[in-house]
Amino acid sequence: MSDWIQAYGESHQHPVNRACHTVGIPLVTLSILLLLAAPLVPWLWKAGLVLFGVGWFFQFLGHAVEGKPPEFFKDWRFLLVGLRWWALKVSGRVPPAP
């Protein structure tokens, strides 16, 4: 996993990109949880869709600033690595940008 986190970090070095992902990743994750719960609470689908769009906006904005495409364009598994990177970042254990 450390190799995946390192590869992810290499394409997420710009501080704006890192900040955008710090916000965008939890928004997308929360949106998925809301969309899964939407059959039980009908209004949740609207909140889920808004958070999904805003979360991805932040992530693509970060990549535009970074000037590099998202890693998941090469390998879908980086979608999960991004979530792991975020968990390491908020816990203070993600390697700093070089």
Image: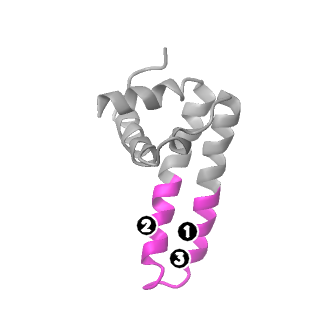
Name the residue beneath numbered marker 1: 48
Q: Residues within 10 Å of mark 3 (few under 14, many from 20)?
A: some
Q: In terms of sequence position, does the residue under pointer 2 or pointer 1 come before the other?
A: 2
Q: In the rendered structure, which amino acid carries the disc numbered 2?
A: Leu
Q: Are marks 1 and 3 in contact (CB under 8 Å)?
A: yes
Name the residue beneath numbered marker 2: 33
The residue located at (39%, 42%) in the rendering is 81
Q: In the rendered structure, which amino acid carries the disc numbered 1?
A: Gly
Q: Residues within 10 Å of mark 1 (few under 14, many from 20)?
A: many
Percent position (x, y) of residue 44?
A: 53, 76
Given the current orientation, which residue lies at the most extreme left position?
1
Q: Which residues are magenta?
A: 27-53
Image-quadrant location for residue 92: top left
Residues under labels 2 and 1: Cα distance? Answer: 8 Å
Image-quadrant location for residue 90: top left
Judge left or right: residue 47 versus residue 10: right
Q: Is residue 92 visible?
A: no
